[in-house]
Image: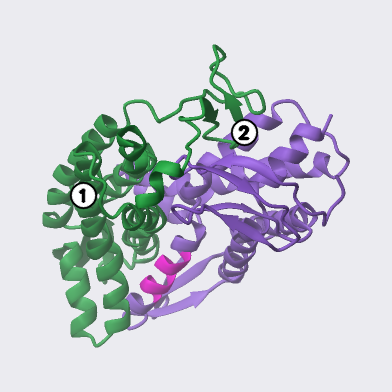
Chain colours: A purple, B green
């Protein structure tokens, strides 16, 4: 199956209402929804897998930068706190707030790492119509973990904190903060570019 | 939906659709999807009971989440605890009403309306109500989409804890309200995922 092809007609059950829908052929950038409950059933984003892989690489680089450099600095009159992306998670852990620390670490570090490395593991071999062991298992879990990837919500959290703290002292964003903002846009774009049905069909055809 | 009688679901056709990859196959002895090896169910097992259990847990935890402070601010020897609502009022009193609106929506409006919506969906499914199915399907998708955004306040607390360590001048620690609130968000997200929206449509086929 070449990139940028139409998706073949198929019979599917709507995941939201179980109605059988006969989907027509989908040209690139077309989508189909359920005739009864209007849930989106299938999309065919242009160049989905190639773009998805390129965006995944970009996101990995941005994620590395976001974790390697100072994130925010806060303070005045010589008393300044420098923080990185994981500082809050570590502080919460030291305060004995283990559950909070784990929840924030899971949704802003662990899940993004799993999602990005998992996408690489799936999409890179698929470029050559191959699949690595456990590809189906990984694809299933990437889809299940998707709602728990909360980097874009963390970004809104940063903005709210900035408004709250800027009157108290000086808040200076570091290199990581800019990388993180880009990361949020790239990750959102990646999700819009990838379509589960395309990946499943390519996995089925791959060796 | 008066035309529901002419509409065929996968269950009517003795087919089962994989929750994970959407692969459609005849109901058979095999319990695993031929394409992705996930366990197959026509409907999520025990969906209504599980969702009720999670929802009631979340409702109970929502009370301390709102009554206990989510942050403890120590400044010049005094320590002050702030609840979620006090955080909203702080922004309002400082004229930052866009931020007050964001926090109010994410921390109060969304969790409350989510719990009310889930209760409505569960009760209407249990009574096998044929009314407003399209609207309920939309409500469910909205609940599923918007629930995670309540984490904003938990992240705000995390970032403030990391940054505000200015010794005697000001130090912020997380309060126990933040733990309860975070648990409410996580549990309601799991509740939304354990609810099977196909139950909204089920009885019409059986009645017809």
Q: Which residues are magenta?
A: A155-162
SS at mark 1 in the image: helix
Q: Which mark is residue B120?
A: 1
Looking at the image, residue B59 sits to the left or right of residue A106; the answer is left
Q: Residue at x 16, y 67 (%)?
A: B85
Of callouts 2 and 1, the N-terminal one:
2
Alpha-carbon span between mark 2 and mark 1: 31 Å
Where residue A118 sits: x, y (%)? 66, 40
Q: Nearer the viewer, residue A59 or A189?
A: A189
Image quarter hosting the C terminus of chain B: top left
Considering only vertical position in the picture, is B175 above or below B207?
below
Query: Which class describes the residues within 10 Å of circle 2: few (<14), some (14-19), or many (20+)?
Result: many
Give the structural element (helix, strand or loop) at label 2. loop
Task: Name the side, left or right, on which B111 lies relative to A33.
Answer: left
Mark carried by residue A88: none
Q: Is residue B9 above or below residue B73?
A: above
Q: Chain of mark 1?
A: B
A138 to B187, vertically: above or below: above
Residue B130 is a magenta residue: no
Would you say A139 lies left or right of B20 here? right
Q: Is residue B25 visible?
A: yes
Q: Residue at x 51, y 40 (%)?
A: A144
Residue drawn at (61%, 23%) of the image: B37
Q: Name the residue tied to disc 2.
A: B23
């Amino acid at each position: 199956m070449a990139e940028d092809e139409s998706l073949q007609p198929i019979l599917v059950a709507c995941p939201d209402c179980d109605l059988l829908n006969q989907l027509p052929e989908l040209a690139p950038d077309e989508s189909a929804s359920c005739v009864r409950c209007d849930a989106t059933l299938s999309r065919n984003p242009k160049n989905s897998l190639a773009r998805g892989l390129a965006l995944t690489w970009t996101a990995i680089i941005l994620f590395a930068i976001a974790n390697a450099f100072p994130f925010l600095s806060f303070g005045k009159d010589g008393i300044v706190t420098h923080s990185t992306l994981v500082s809050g998670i570590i502080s919460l852990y030291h305060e004995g707030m283990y559950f909070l620390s784990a929840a924030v670490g899971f949704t802003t570090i662990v899940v993004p790492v799993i999602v990005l490395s998992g996408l690489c593991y799936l999409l890179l071999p698929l470029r050559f119509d191959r699949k690595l062991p456990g590809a189906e298992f990984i694809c299933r879990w990437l889809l299940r973990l998707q709602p728990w990837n909360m980097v874009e919500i963390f970004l809104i959290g940063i903005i709210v904190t900035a408004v709250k703290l800027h009157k108290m002292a000086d808040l200076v964003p570091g290199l990581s903060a800019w990388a993180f903002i880009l990361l949020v846009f790239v990750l959102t774009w990646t999700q819009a570019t990838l379509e589960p049905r395309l990946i499943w069909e390519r996995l089925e055809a791959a060796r | 939906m008066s035309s529901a009688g002419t509409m065929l679901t996968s269950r009517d056709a003795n087919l089962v659709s994989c929750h994970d990859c959407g692969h459609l196959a005849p109901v058979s002895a095999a319990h695993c999807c031929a394409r992705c090896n996930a366990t197959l169910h026509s409907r999520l097992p025990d969906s209504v009971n599980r969702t009720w259990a999670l929802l009631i847990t979340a409702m109970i935890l929502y009370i301390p989440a709102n009554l206990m402070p989510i942050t403890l601010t120590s400044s010049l020897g005094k320590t002050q605890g702030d609840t979620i609502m006090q955080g909203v009022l702080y922004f309002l009193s400082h004229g930052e009403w866009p931020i007050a609106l964001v926090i109010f929506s994410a921390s109060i409006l969304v969790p409350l309306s989510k719990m009310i919506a889930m209760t409505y969906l569960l009760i209407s499914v249990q009574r096998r109500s044929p009314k407003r199915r399209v609207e309920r399907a939309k409500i469910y998708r909205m609940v599923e989409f918007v629930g995670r955004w309540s984490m904003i306040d938990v992240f705000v607390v995390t970032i403030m804890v990391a940054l505000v360590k200015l010794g005697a001048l000001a130090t912020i620690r997380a309060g126990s309200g933040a733990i309860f609130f975070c648990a409410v968000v996580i549990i309601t997200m799991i509740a939304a995922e354990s609810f099977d929206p196909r139950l909204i449509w089920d009885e019409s086929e059986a009645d017809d």
